[in-house]
Image: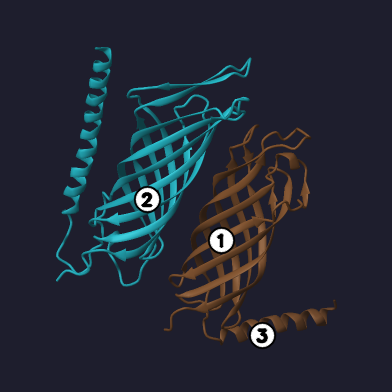
Amino acid sequence: MILFAKIQNQILSYLRYMKGILLIFTLTLGFCFLGQADRKYTPAGMLSLGGRTTVSLFNDHENEMTGTGVGGQFRLQFSDAVNTDWFFDYITSDILNYAHRTDYHIGWSVLFYPINNLDYFRQKEEFKPKFRPYILAGHCFDYSKIEAKVSPLDGPMSAERWSSAVQAGLGTHLELSPRFDISLTGQYMIHLGNHIETDYDFTTGALSFNEHKGASLAGHVLVTLSLNYKIAKLWGFTRR
Amino acid sequence: MGIHQKITGLFLLVSTLIYSQERPSYFQPSLLRASATIAPTRFYTQQTTVALINGFVEYALENRISVRGEANIMAPNGKLLYTNSPEKFPRNFTSIYAGFGYHLGKRNWKFDIHAEPGIAISEMAQQPFLIVPVAYQWSVSPSYMLKGGTSFYFSKYCHFFAEINYSNGWIRKTPLTSVSIAQYGISAGLGFHVLTKKN
C-alpha cells in the first residue's frame, strides 16, 4: 500500500509538472502568430548555430562551489517576438575538496522579446549594433554524476541520477551584425525529481552518498554567454 | 643605432604601410586562413610555463565576422619549460576551441578579437606525492579562450599574425583540490590564406 501511494504521488507530481510544460508550449505557439505583419521580411524560420560558456552559481547542493561549463546550441525563430534555444551544456563543479560533480543539460528555452515593436529594432539600410532584451523560460533533461576525489581501494566511488528541470530568466542579445549576435542570459534552473546528497565527516574524512527518491526542488543560477550566427532560413522567405 | 638609421627605418616602415594600402583588400568574406606555430604559455596559477603547439583554421563569414577553430597541444611527455610543482601539473594537455572573431581595421591590417568556448583534455597523476609509478587519469574539462591580436595581409596567400590569449578552466578529476588551468600565452608567425569564393 505504501509503495502504491508513493507511485501515485510520483505520477501526480509528474502530471502537475507536465502541465507547466504544456502551458509554456501553448504560449509559444500563441506568440508565433503574433506580430506577423504583411511585409516582405520576417525573421520567422531563421536558424542560428552557436557555442556557449556557462557559469553555475548558488548551487543548492551542500558545499558545492561555482561550476563552469561549455556547450552548444541552435536557435530557431518563430516570429518577430518569439525565438527558441535548443542547447546542450557540460558543467563541472567542486564539492569542496572531497568530491566533484558533472552535469549534462540538454533542453530548450523559449525567448520572448517584450519590447520588440520599438523603432529601435527595425531593419535600417545601414545596420547598427543593438541590444535586444528578452525573457526566457524552458525545460531540460539533466544527468548528474558526483564522484569522490579519493577513491577507496575497492574502486571509484560515485553516485548518479537522471532528472528533469525547468528554467526561467532574463537576457539580452548584442547584435553585432544582421547575422551575428552575442547573448548573455541569467536564469534560475530548478531540478525536479531524484537527488543525491553527500555526507562528509570532516574529522574522519569519511564520505557517503545518499540517493533520495521522489520530487525535490533543488536549483542553481546559470549565467550563460553564447555566440550565435544565423546560418539558414527554413521557412517564410518573403511575403507579398 | 643612430638617429639617421632610426629615421630611415621609420621612413621604410611608413612607406611599406602606404604601399600596402594601394593593394587590393585581401581580407574579405569567404577568406579561409590557417597556420600553426609554437605558443609559449604561462599557467600562472600553477607557476608553470610550457610551449604549446597552436594551430587554427578561420573562415571570414562577413567583413568583420569570422568563425574559428583552434587547438593547443602540449607535446606528449614533453619537458616543462619552468615549473614549481610538476607533480600537480598535467602530464599531457590538449585544448580545443571553436568560436567567433570580430575584425576591425581597414583593408589589409586588421585587429582581431576572438571568443571561443572549448574543452581541455588532460592527464593527471592520481597519487601525486608517491615516488613509485603512479596511475594517471584522463579527463575532459570545460574551458574558454579569449584572444586579441593583429594580422597583416601582405600578399594574396600569406599574412603575418601576432596574438595574445587568455583561457581558463578547472581539472576536477584530481585526488587533491582541483587544478586551475588559467593561462595566458602568445603566438605569432606566418599564416596562409585563400579566397574560397570569387567576387
Q: Which residue is mark 3?
A: B15
- Which corner quadrant of the image does residue B186 belong to? bottom right
For marks 1 and 3 on the same chain, the one whose residue lies earlier in the sequence? 3
Secondary element under disc 3, as helix, strand or loop, is helix
Query: Which hue belongs to chain B?
Result: brown
Look at 59% across and 48% down and name the residue there. B121
Look at 66% across and 63% down and name the residue there. B187
Q: Tag count in the figure?
A: 3
Q: Quadrant of the C terminus of chain B?
A: bottom left
Q: Chain of mark 1?
A: B
Q: Which residue is mark 2?
A: A172
Vertical arrangement, residue A121 with respect to residue B139, above or below: below
In the image, is A221 to the left or to the right of B167? left
**Which kind of residue does numbered mark 3 sit on?**
Ser
In the image, the chain rendered in cyan is A
Secondary element under disc 2, as helix, strand or loop, is strand
Going by the picture, which residue comes out furthest to the front? Answer: A154
Q: Look at the image and tell me whether residue B181 can be seen.
A: no
**Do labels 2 and 1 touch, CB within 8 Å?**
no
Q: Chain of mark 3?
A: B
Disc 1 crowd, CA 10 A, few/some/many (<14, 14-19, 20+): some
Residue B140: percent from left, percent from top: 55, 45
Q: Look at the image and tell me whether residue B16 can be seen.
A: yes
Badge number at residue A94 = none
Vertical arrangement, residue B31 with respect to residue A80, above or below: below
Distance Cα–Cα, label 2 vs label 1: 28 Å
**Which kind of residue does numbered mark 2 sit on?**
Thr
Q: Which residue is mark 1?
A: B70
